[in-house]
Image: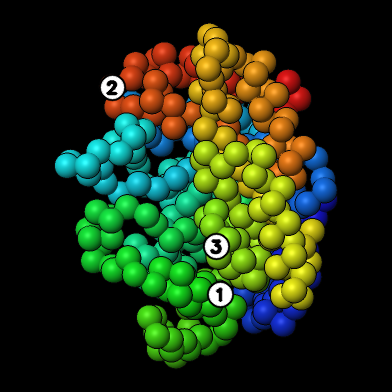
Amino acid sequence: MRSVRRQLTSDRGTESATATGDERSTAVECTHDTQTYGEPMQRGFGLPISGSWATPPSIVEIAQAAERHGYASLWTFQRLLFPADDPIPMPYRSVHDPIVVAAYAAAVTQTARLGIAIANMPYYSPILLAKMYTSLDAVSGGRFDAGLGLGWNADEFAAVGTPMDRRGARAEEFIRCLRAIWTDDPVEFHGEFYDVPRSYVDPKPVQRPHPPLLLGGGAESALRRIARLADGWIASSRFPAEQVPAAVETLRSEATAAGRDPDAIRIVIRGSVKVRDTDEGAPPLTGTIEKIRRDIDAYAEAGASEFFVDLNFDDQIGNPDADPAQSMRRAHEALEAFAPNA
């Protein structure tokens, strides 16, 4: 198992940054383990962030319970709005900010990594997100995984004033700018979409040269981009286990072609788990606990390095009209049933 620092510095080559001067007083050796290809699949758990169960006491309760059960990571996701005229699934109806919730959970946990799955790059400037993610890395003691996405909701793009066109090109430049902000001192970046005047941007992240960058997406072009630019892939919430091997092969072959270590690419699966009383007609990750355990095992066999159980996408839990006490009861049952050593 590799530490985050060892993985990033070995795979980044000349992009690795060494702490100098005043930075030596704040930089720490990061020893938090992350899973890489070919190792046993780690388990994580989605924090309450959507619906009636997403309250401050519940976030603390679930975060601490997940650590006690041995979960390796805790995750949040982003949704800015719920279109009034073209409704999307109810778990998107009422969603907290993913960075704030992750920071809140960091303060009440000790070992679990904190992941954002994901924050959409077009909704930020690189300098703003770099500052926010650096602070989250600091308050978590270097336990942060930086999830990034391109966005898909046209109403959200309209609300933030960003065009939806050329999202791929914008994303690639965003990542280059983000990495420059974190590793160059001073930084100066001038691109087609983003500019940073020659500046000192401090503090730097705890993790060197920066927190692991995990990108969402499932299209062939997205997988190729991930293999070239990121430290791992976060699959969409309904990505089938039977399609994981082909995606892994694309990631590994593209990483090799780019001169990167394919074994270092993390394969993270968001499992939209829905526990029910019957398996009849149930899709993957829906049904009885026994069936869902088999479904989770299928992702491990398919090549996933990490899998996190996310109850927020169950409309009986991640819904503003759901009974929060019932949601918490079911969450504790799921925490125990799907724990790493269950």
Give the residue drawn at x 72%, y 68%.
255
- What label does residue 222 carry, if any? 3
Residue 186 coordinates in the image, percent (x, y): 52, 87
As helix, strand or loop, the secondary structure at mark 2 comes to loop
Q: Nearer the viewer, residue 223 or 58?
A: 223
Residue 205: x, y in percent? 57, 66
Q: Is residue 195 above or below residue 93?
A: below
Callout in the foreground (2, 3): 3
Residue at 23% in and 66% down:
161
- Secondary structure at badge 1 equals helix
* Pointer 1 local density, CA inside 10 Å: few below 14, some 14–19, many at least 20: some
Tell whether 263 sits left or right of 181. Answer: right
Q: Nearer the viewer, mark 2 or mark 1?
A: 2
Q: Residue at x 68, y 23 (%)?
A: 293
Instruction: First in sequence, mark 1 or 3: give its number.
Output: 1
Colouring used for the render: rainbow
